[in-house]
Amino acid sequence: MSTREPMEEIITVSSGQLKGIRLPELGAIAWLGIPYAEPPIHKLRWKAPREIEAWTGVFPASDFKNNSVQFIQGEPDGSEDCLFLNIWRPDHTEAGLPVFVFLHGGGNIGGSGRDFQGGELACKTNSIVVTVNYRLGAMGFFRHPSLRTGDPLDDSGNYGLLDVLHALKWLHKNIVCFGGNPGNITLGGQSAGARNALAAYLSPLGRGLFHKLFIMSGGLTTAVTEQSEEKADDILTELLIKTGTVSTQDETREWISTQSADKISDFLYRQNAFHFVEIIRETGLQMAAFPHLIEDGTVIPIGGFDNLNNLDHPSLPIILGSTASEFSEFTLGDTHFFSLVQKEELAGNMEEKKLYEAAVQYGSDLYAEFNVEQTTEILLSAIPAMPIYAYRFAWGLRDGVIDPYIRFLIGAPHGADIPFYTGDFSGVQERFPADVISEHNEPGRNMLSSLMRDYLRHFLYTGNPNTEGQPAWQRYTPNPRSAEILWLDANQDQTIVQSVCKLVKKDILSQMDNDPRLAAEQRNWLKNNLFAGRFFW
């Protein structure tokens, strides 16, 4: 992060006084780690967020606070006391600025608000940028019969989503204190954060809390209560064995059947939060691995997005985006391919190389189609007048832009569009050090970043990304064969932006079935192993 300087100015919000920091290199000011709800600890662990009590004195909003409990690089991190938000804005006195609330990705088991550095984006878009920490994993999405209290919010199991909605309520009440306009809030996110933003739109509790959506690589996903409660029982079983309460599966069934709901609830509340995290450490785009965004009937309607036609939802402007190589890192992370890469045996093995290329191509097309085309078609079928704009981010696929082997492995991967908005490319270089971010590609990369932020700025202000002097961005229509996806790319020196045709799932599957690169057993392996159970399959 850039150099920090303390602020002298004190801001008063509903819960007390705050003092933030200046970021002079960016021309921004920030308030980091603001508590927006009571800590969800002890008896509040699996409860809807509670209003924060006022603090005394001046709260030092100068540093990021705790992440939600999770594993980072194999090590436990974070705390159950995690309900904090971060605010950035330009360092001037203009008021009434649009507000962009961004929800981090991470499969709803990882990530935090610090992942999206908002200072530069706030200045480039002359807006207020907010990021939110919310409960993750089994602390954020957990529904077990023994925990029922009779309160529909406390019993919903959707604690992470309720945290997001509570943060939005806090912002509605307080964002004017930071120079923001509570009547112009855009809710956005990437991956799981984008899916959470869409779920907030679906939720009746989200009405009126935001006015536009900015969705990056996030589709329409919910889980039924039965699926969630079965997973909660599985977690309970593992905890009983892990703690030595019982020794075998048979004993767990007997223990559960003979204990009262209060005894089971007490057992769950006594467990260290990291014991839950150890059980749910990877989801791999599979709802069965960690059912979340639960159709409880209060926070999320029964039937989820399939029931959108029967619900009275407002028509909000939406930008929906995906990357061109959405599935590349998930392919690379598969044990079969990862082993070959570690042994440096993939590039020289033509059969495996062709299989890898096909896996990335079809997995990415299916995932991108799920995130954008399927989402858009469901929304438009319910609300035909909804103004939707769609993009596909492709930087990194063009010859001569990044290292050829890295291009083969990852292309334009899931999340690669984030730094083009934030301006913070440090994380990309840490993940892929082989000349992904270089002086060689800097001119084109900076031009593409500037274009994308221009579109976003205009969208934050008006609900329409089109701005004078930039390539026209067409609204999405139900015509499946029309070229209405804005393709965002750049070579070493300049942007390359054009409208491209939509992806059609049956065409992707047909192409895969007739791909001469794939033998029958390879095709079956993709379908029955690599793709099986994923959101898009």
Image (tube, helix red, strand yellow):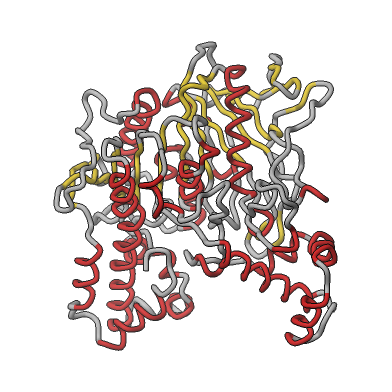
Judge by depth and name the residue closer to the eye, 21 or 367: 367
Q: Quadrant of the C terminus?
A: bottom left
Residue 338: tell me if it is visible. Answer: yes
**In the drawing, does residue 244 fall left or right of residue 536?**
right
Residue 120: tell me if it is visible. Answer: no
Q: Is residue 369 above or below residue 27?
A: below
Residue at the farthest top position: 93
Residue 256 in the image: state x and y as whole percent: 77, 76
Judge by depth and name the residue closer to the eye, 514 or 328: 514
Residue 201 in the image: state x and y as whole percent: 46, 41
Number of numbered discs: 0
- Please tell me which residue is depicted at 68% across the width and 71% down the height of the picture: 233
Residue 465 in the image: state x and y as whole percent: 30, 31
- Please tell me which residue is depicted at 64% across the width and 54% down the height of the picture: 157
Q: Where is residue 29, by image quadrant?
A: top right
Q: Where is residue 275, by image quadrant?
A: bottom right
Q: Is residue 301 above or below residue 348?
A: above
Q: Quadrant of the N terminus?
A: top right
